[in-house]
Image (cartoon, helix red, strand yellow):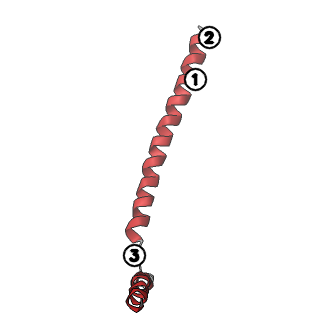
Amino acid sequence: MKILDKTKRLVIAIPLLAASAAHAVAVDVTPVTAAIADAGKAIGVVGAAVLVMVVGMKVWKWIQRAL
């Protein structure tokens, strides 16, 4: 029974020690923020292209109805 109790303590203690060491490590987020900024530019370009297409289709339909 004592061996089982020690094993339970060990099984519980190891992940707790690993978690306590992991939170102290500083994470460098510079590449992530740069990637998000680059993705924002690409999303803006795609959004502008979609807007141009939608407006172009509306204008085309408007011209077709006028003829």
User: As rendered, which of 14 and 42 lies closer to the eye?
Assistant: 14
Residue 28, numbered circle: 3
Q: Percent position (x, y) of residue 7?
A: 38, 86
* Above-or-below relation of 41 to 30: above
Label 3 sits on what residue type?
Answer: Asp
Residue 51 place in picture, x, y as percent: 53, 35
Judging depth in this view, the residue of 23 and 31 nearest the camera is: 23
Q: Amino acid at mark 1?
A: Lys
Q: Residues within 10 Å of mark 1 (few under 14, many from 20)?
A: few
Sort mark 2 into few (<14), some (14-19) or many (20+) by Cα contacts within 10 Å.
few
Q: Nearer the viewer, residue 55 or 11?
A: 11
Does dot 1 land on a helix, a strand or a loop?
helix
Q: Quadrant of residue 18?
A: bottom left
- Residue named by callout 1: 58
Residue 3 x/y as whole percent: 37, 90
Q: Quadrant of the C terminus?
A: top right
Mark 3 and mark 1 lie on one chain; the one further toward the N terminus is: 3
> Residue flagged by tag 2: what amino acid is it?
Ala
Mark-to-mark CA distance, 2 and 3: 59 Å
Q: For mark 2, what is the residue?
A: 66
Residue at image coords 42%, 84%: 8
Alpha carbons under labels 3 and 1: distance apart? 47 Å
Residue 13 location, quadrant = bottom left
2 or 3: tag closer to the N-terminus: 3
Residue 44 location (% of width, % of height): 48, 47
The alpha-carbon separation of the residues under discs 2 and 1 comes to: 12 Å
- Seen from this angle, which residue lies furthest top? 67
Residue at x-position 39% and y-position 75%: 28
Which one is closest to the eye, mark 2 or mark 1?
Answer: 1
Foreground label between 2 and 3: 3
Name the residue located 54 percent from the left edge and 29 percent from the top edge: 54
